[in-house]
């Protein structure tokens, strides 16, 4: 397994620094950063979505426009953060996939390369917030109609 990064040709100014870096260290750091982004995404989703739904439903029941605006604003903040951390996660994911390809990992160990198929498939980062938005408003509408 090749563990040296070949950056000398691209960035000669890093030639002294590069001898201390290897793919294993980068793989560990990139996977840690990816896990951090995913933890943030799951955490904000479990807080923002139920809270914004509850606010929207309460506002619809009690005809309170301010709370409804707050619920929608909370959802829009989640929507922005979802995109923000989702795109931040794409960079370390690409690095991890490149390291797996460059070092000829056995096919069964190419975890991030295999995830690539699912991440960029039907529920890609481009479409999942839109799908969540549609589901969000359908669920809010259905619950609202059921309550009345």
Image (cartoon, grey):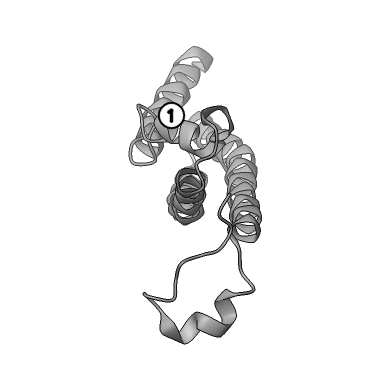
In the figure, 134 relative to 3: above or below? above
Q: Residues within 10 Å of mark 1 (few under 14, many from 20)?
A: few
The image quarter containing residue 121 is: top left
Q: Nearer the viewer, residue 64 or 119?
A: 119
Q: Position of residue 1 (x, y in %)?
A: 58, 49
Q: Nearer the viewer, residue 12 or 86?
A: 12
Q: Position of residue 6 (x, y in %)?
A: 46, 67
Which residue is at 40% across, 23% downward? 138
Q: Which residue is mark 1?
A: 118
Q: Nearer the viewer, residue 2 or 11?
A: 2
Whether residue 73 appears in this view of the structure is: no
The image quarter containing residue 4 is: bottom right
Which residue is at 46% across, 26% downward? 140
Q: Nearer the viewer, residue 147 or 91?
A: 91
Which residue is at 56% across, 35% downward? 111
54 displayed left or right of 14: right
Of all residues, the one furthest to the front in this rendering is 1
Q: Position of residue 22 (x, y in %)?
A: 60, 63
| Number of marks | 1
| SS at circle 1 | helix
Whether residue 106 appears in this view of the structure is: yes
134 displayed left or right of 91: left
In the figure, 100 relative to 110: above or below? below
Q: Position of residue 27 (x, y in %)?
A: 60, 53
43 displayed left or right of 80: right
């Amino acid at each position: 397994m090749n563990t040296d990064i070949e950056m000398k040709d691209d960035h000669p100014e890093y030639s002294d620094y590069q001898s201390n870096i290897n793919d294993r260290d980068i793989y560990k750091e990139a996977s840690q950063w990816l896990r951090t982004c995913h933890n943030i995404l799951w955490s904000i989703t479990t807080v923002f979505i139920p809270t914004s739904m509850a606010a929207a439903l309460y506002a619809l029941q009690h005809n309170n426009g301010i709370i409804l605006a707050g619920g929608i604003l909370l959802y829009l903040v989640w929507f922005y953060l979802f995109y923000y951390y989702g795109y931040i996660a794409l960079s370390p994911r690409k690095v991890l996939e490149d390291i797996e390809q460059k070092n000829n990992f056995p096919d069964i160990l190419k975890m991030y390369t295999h995830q690539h198929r699912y991440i960029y498939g039907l529920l890609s980062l481009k479409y999942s917030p839109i799908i969540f938005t549609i589901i969000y408003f359908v669920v809010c509408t259905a619950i609202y109609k059921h309550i009345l």
